[in-house]
Amino acid sequence: MERLLCTSVAGTDEKLNRWFTILKIVLFCMPFLYLGYVGIGTGGASLADEGVLQANPTMAVSFLSAMIQPYAAWILILSQRRLQDGRSAYAMVNLGVLLVAQLMMMSTVGVVGFALILWRCTKHTGFGPLAALRQIQPRRLFAEVGGSVVVLLLAAVCLFATVRIGALPV
């Protein structure tokens, strides 16, 4: 158990640090990219206009999903710090929960980015998110993974709304 909790990964792998940086930048830019996409797609109409969001509720869900991404990037920064200071098990659980959240939000960039980072971290630590979940202390779980759980809950809202508006067949 001590070996799992005290493994430092991110400080030694330059490629992993590069992937963290790229994903953080992309996730932080997602709201701006989405606003540019909406501005082009609606002919310059703003999101404040009621007609744009009421005419296409899928846009509202995509807007919410894009606004969650900077928070996911901030949790990614915290996960990277946990990897560097030796709390690899907590970082692996965080990354696993964030990957599930990206799947629920149907963010291709997020899914690919988190999957690559999780794969690389699994390769270096020698354990995956499920093995890490079995090894961490239950009383510290919410303190370490609480931010990812919030992202997961917001992603569940996005998935529920997508199903309700009929954009995703069940």
Image (spheres, grey):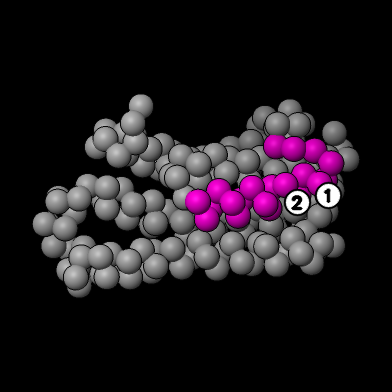
Residue kind at label 2, given as amino acid type: Arg
**What is the number of callouts on the image?**
2
Quick one: label 2, few (<14), some, or many (20+) residues within 10 Å?
A: some
Q: Which residue is mark 2?
A: 120
* Residue closest to the eye, 4 or 21: 21
What is the quadrant of the C terminus in the image?
A: top left
Labels 2 and 1 touching (C-beta < 8 A): yes
Q: Is residue 156 left or right of residue 13?
A: left
Residue 101: where, in percent of width, then height?
Answer: 50, 42
Height in image: 124 above or below 137?
A: below
Q: Residue at x 20, y 72 (%)?
A: 44
Magenta stretch: give its range. 108-129
Give me the disc on residue 124. Answer: 1
* Residue closest to the eye, 21 or 39: 39
- Give the quarter of the image for residue 130: top right
Q: Residue at x 76, y 49 (%)?
A: 121
Residue kind at label 1, given as amino acid type: His
Q: Is residue 147 left or right of residue 46?
A: right
- Give the quarter of the image for residue 20: bottom right
Residue 141: where, in percent of width, then height?
Answer: 64, 36
What is the quadrant of the N terminus in the image?
A: top right
- Where disc 1 sits, the SS reads helix
- Where disc 2 sits, the SS reads helix
Q: Residue at x 26, y 69 (%)?
A: 39
Residue 154: where, in percent of width, then height?
Answer: 40, 43
Task: Looking at this view, name the residue that lies furthest to the left.
Answer: 51
Residue 81: where, in percent of width, then height?
Answer: 70, 58
User: Is residue 157 in sight in this rendering?
Assistant: no
